[in-house]
Image (tube, grey):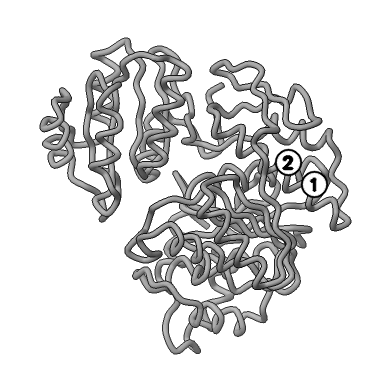
């Protein structure tokens, strides 16, 4: 069984459109025997930080001796990355087998599921077949109508940082977007919220009160960053001292605080997660394309930031570690607020190479080049990621930062021949 055969099975039997709503997912899941009912979940929604937080929690629970399923999206390099158990991705053979098992059910459906919905159903079956103790389930988009939201009350619902993204689907106010994320809050459940704007916190608190859910808001005053290098940072978080986190940036310390708060809430539900599991889990946490160093000489940083808020964090982190002009390789999607994203890098951009990410939604490199030129940033439009990297690596000894889209990030990692899950340092 080849990777292509496994992936093509999914693409063959699913609709290629993107369409929110739970009707198709509920019907497919019912036909499949509701495998999710035998699983325990941690459900994670939010605009930014949900991937990092999910991976940290998964790593901690693994170190505590649990068999942990992890569902995330999108993938960077291989489709299989979306489904993992204890850090190991689903095999091509198992992906193919589950897909073929679901195939007869699709013929009974009134309407074909989307690719994402079918992938969620494959995940439920995969985690059930392998008797996972607990599954961290990352929301793809929004919350209320995301395919993952057919599950019953999870052990814990987590809402990370919320901001403007996918406004055409989720609404154009913070309250509207927050209410969509709050769709994962089930009656009488436990909820952990990222500390943020009062409007967001008050909205989540309001929904929790309506549904009888218990709300905990992470307190980032607990965090003390003791030291930072390009290999990681050492933190004190509440009573835990000298935590080593290999992920860079102040935002990752907040995500680590969210993970630790999650553990405390889970321990109140008869899980047994020691402080040693927290220390070891965070030490071993790795998330590709999150301010990832992928080359040493010259220094090349890869970041999958793809909205203005991500770019705020990226620029803050670049200034925090380097405080100098940066050479950028930039590729963005045309349905993002890319003009604001680009304006944010102008003060620290020494030079830019523009590329089109590998997506039908990509903004063409020459269009991005025109925008940069209008902002008085020197740049070159490139036909491919390989061309951009070849030029940048040949022409500069400065720090190079590749950013703008997760679709771009996979191609960047492939250029440096970094396999999925592999890290340079």
Q: Residue 367 carries which label?
A: none
Does any portion of residue 129 appear in the rendered image? no
Whether pointer 2 and pointer 1 mark residues with C-beta atoms closer than 8 Å, the reply is: yes
Hey, which residue is sitting farthest top in the picture?
397
Does any portion of residue 74 appear in the rendered image? yes
- Mark 2 lies on residue: 260
Q: Give the image location of residue 21, x and y in percent.
A: 46, 76
Name the quadrant of the C terminus.
Answer: top right
Tell whether 334 sits left or right of 41.
left
- Mark 1 lies on residue: 264
- Would you place residue 283 above or below residue 178 in this image? above
- Would you place residue 39 above or below residue 58 in this image? below
Q: Nearer the viewer, residue 294 or 184?
A: 184
Question: How dense is the environment of label 2, judged by Cα within 10 Å: few (below 14), some, or many (20 and up)?
Answer: many
Give me the residue at 43% from left, 14% from top.
322
Q: Nearer the viewer, residue 52 or 16?
A: 52
């Amino acid at each position: 069984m080849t990777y292509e055969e496994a992936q093509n099975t999914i693409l063959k039997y699913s609709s290629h459109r993107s369409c929110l709503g739970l009707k198709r997912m509920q019907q497919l899941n019912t036909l499949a025997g509701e495998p999710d009912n035998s699983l325990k979940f941690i459900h994670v929604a939010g605009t930014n930080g949900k991937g990092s937080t999910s991976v940290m929690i998964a790593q901690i629970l693994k170190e505590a001796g649990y068999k942990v399923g992890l569902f995330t999206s999108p993938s960077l390099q291989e489709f299989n990355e979306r489904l993992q158990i204890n850090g190991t991705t689903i095999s091509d053979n198992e992906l193919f087998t589950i897909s073929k098992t679901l195939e007869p059910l699709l013929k009974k459906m009134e309407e074909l599921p989307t690719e994402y919905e079918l992938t969620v159903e494959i995940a439920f079956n995969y985690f059930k077949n392998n008797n996972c103790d607990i599954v961290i389930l990352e929301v793809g988009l929004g919350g209320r109508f995301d395919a993952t939201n057919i599950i019953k009350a999870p052990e814990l619902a987590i809402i990370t940082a919320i901001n403007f993204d996918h406004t055409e689907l989720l609404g154009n106010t913070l309250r509207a977007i927050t209410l969509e994320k709050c769709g994962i809050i089930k009656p009488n459940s436990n909820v952990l919220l990222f500390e943020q704007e009062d409007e967001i916190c008050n909205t989540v608190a309001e929904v929790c009160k309506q549904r009888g859910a218990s709300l905990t808001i992470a307190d980032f005053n607990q965090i003390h960053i003791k030291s930072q290098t390009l290999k990681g940072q050492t933190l004190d978080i509440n009573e835990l001292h000298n935590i080593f986190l290999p992920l860079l940036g102040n935002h990752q310390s907040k995500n680590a605080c969210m993970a630790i708060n999650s553990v405390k809430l889970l321990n109140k539900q008869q899980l047994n997660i020691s402080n040693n599991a927290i220390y070891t889990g965070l030490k071993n946490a790795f998330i590709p394309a999150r301010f990832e160093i992928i080359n040493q000489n010259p220094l090349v940083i890869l970041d999958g930031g793809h909205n203005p808020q991500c770019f705020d964090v990226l620029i803050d982190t670049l200034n925090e570690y380097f405080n100098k002009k940066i050479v950028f390789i930039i590729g963005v999607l045309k349905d993002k607020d890319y003009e604001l994203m680009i304006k944010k890098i102008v003060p620290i951009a020494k030079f830019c190479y523009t590329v089109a990410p590998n997506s039908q939604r990509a903004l063409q490199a020459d269009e991005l080049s025109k925008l940069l030129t209008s902002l008085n940033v020197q740049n070159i439009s490139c036909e491919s990621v390989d061309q951009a990297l070849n030029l940048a690596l040949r022409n500069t000894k400065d720090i190079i930062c590749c950013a703008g889209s997760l679709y771009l990030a996979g191609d960047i990692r492939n250029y440096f021949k970094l396999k999925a899950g592999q890290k340079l340092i």
